Amino acid sequence: MGKLILHGGEKVLIRFSSGDTEKAVYKETIGYTNYFVCENGRELKLSNHFMDMKDITVSLDK
């Protein structure tokens, strides 16, 4: 995910190109797919390629 190095359990903020944000906990990366667990309990998986195409960014949640 760019220059951001995450470890399992870290809280992140996922920002979509629409301006929407989603708070989540980073779970793991398998291959080029990143797995997150959102606040509502659902799992979100985002590939690096899809994130680049859709201008989705991930940052640490403060």
Image: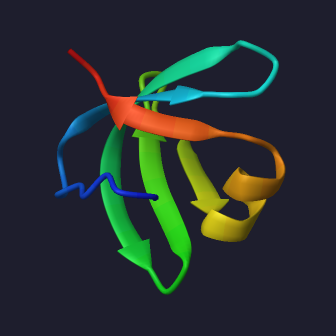
Report the residue at 49% width, 63% height from top: 34
In this rendering, position of residue 11 left or right of residue 23 = left
In the rendered image, the vertical position of residue 43 relative to residue 41, given as above or below: below
> In the rendered image, which quarter is residue 49 located in?
bottom right
In the rendered image, the vertical position of residue 43 relative to residue 16, given as above or below: below
Front-most of residues 22 and 56: 56
Q: Where is residue 19 in the image (x, y as percent from the top left)?
A: 72, 13
> In the rendered image, which quarter is residue 52 located in?
bottom right
Q: How many marks?
A: 0
Q: Where is residue 39 in the image (x, y as percent from the top left)?
A: 42, 23
In this rendering, position of residue 46 left or right of residue 25 = right
Q: Where is residue 9 in the image (x, y as percent from the top left)?
A: 17, 46
Q: Position of residue 40 (x, y in %)?
A: 49, 23
Report the residue at 58% width, 48% height from top: 44
In this rendering, position of residue 38 left or right of residue 45 = left
In the rendered image, the vertical position of residue 39 relative to residue 46, given as above or below: above
Q: Name the outermost residue toward the bottom.
A: 31
> In the rendered image, which quarter is residue 32 located in?
bottom right
In this rendering, position of residue 34 left or right of residue 8 = right
Front-most of residues 44 and 50: 50
